[in-house]
Amino acid sequence: MGPIVESPRETAFRTRYRAFGRMVMAIQACTGHSSSITSPFKDSTMLYQIFSNTPRWVWVLLLALLWIGCKQTVTRTASLKRITVMPLVMTGLSLSGTVTAFGAEPVVLLAWLGAASLVGTVVLQRPLPHATHYNPMERRFSIPGSWVPLLLIMGLFMTKYVVGVASAMHPALAHSSNFTLMFSALYGAFSGIFLARAARLWRLALASDPALGFGAPTAAMT
């Protein structure tokens, strides 16, 4: 009898199972809910049911986010509107995910806001890539490709997915201060990064085009 060869689908599932298991172990370590979190995942069938019962629109959203993130891995041009809208959308998803999972409690919002402010301040201190340019006549940016936006988008998606699954299987987690504060802060950190990255581009635009927001740029601003 020859060796058993896994199909690509089985291999992919095993990979996702191990990755998800590591996330669960991290939640376990931070919240102290070891027995209540780990036991359902000892059986790989349980995890398979989680993925198979995930609504299809979630996977459609994942594909759309992957497409958006992959587009930013290559050098591109972008308008002021485009570099502003995406961070606002991601921040909206982050805040809605926080409030939906943990409620609009003051401590939850403070954790979100505190992490967003702290991380955003740190990112603002970092310079833009040297290849980033702004054309004041066209009011468009030339932005070098980067994998960072894709990683941030996927990080936010996975955070929302993990919180949703864990909260659905263990509703008591929503009342765990460690779990609530940890993920509220994580949501806020993602928002801070998205907003600060956009703010750096706006800072470049304002420095290059003093008339920005007061009408069309003049020839003297080239």
Image: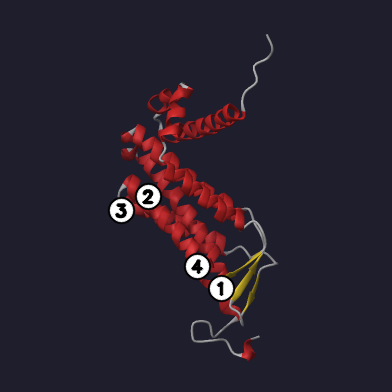
The tag on residue 106 is 3
Q: Earlier in the sequence, mark 3 or mark 1?
A: 3
Residue labelled with disc 2: 98
Q: Amino acid at mark 3?
A: Pro
Residue labelled with disc 4: 84
Q: Is residue 18 left or right of residue 166?
A: right
Which residue is rendered at x = 52% and y = 62% of the image?
Answer: 121
Task: Name the front one of labels 1 and 4.
Answer: 4
Q: Amino acid at mark 1?
A: Arg
Among the 4 quarters of the image, the one containing residue 138: bottom right
The tag on residue 203 is 1
Q: Position of residue 78 (x, y in %)?
A: 59, 69
Q: Position of residue 50 (x, y in %)?
A: 43, 32
Label 3 CA crowd tier, 10 Å (few <14, some 14–19, many 20+): few
Q: Are marks 3 and 4 in contact (CB under 8 Å)?
A: no
Task: Name the front one of labels 3 and 4.
Answer: 4
Q: Earlier in the sequence, mark 1 or mark 2?
A: 2
Q: Are marks 1 and 2 in contact (CB under 8 Å)?
A: no
Q: Amino acid at mark 2?
A: Thr
Q: Secondary structure at mark 4?
A: helix
Q: Nearer the viewer, residue 46 or 98?
A: 46
What distance separates the C-alpha of mark 2 from that of mark 4? 21 Å
Q: Amino acid at mark 4?
A: Thr
Q: Earlier in the sequence, mark 3 or mark 4?
A: 4
Q: What quarter of the picture does the C terminus occupy?
A: bottom right
Q: Earlier in the sequence, mark 2 or mark 3?
A: 2
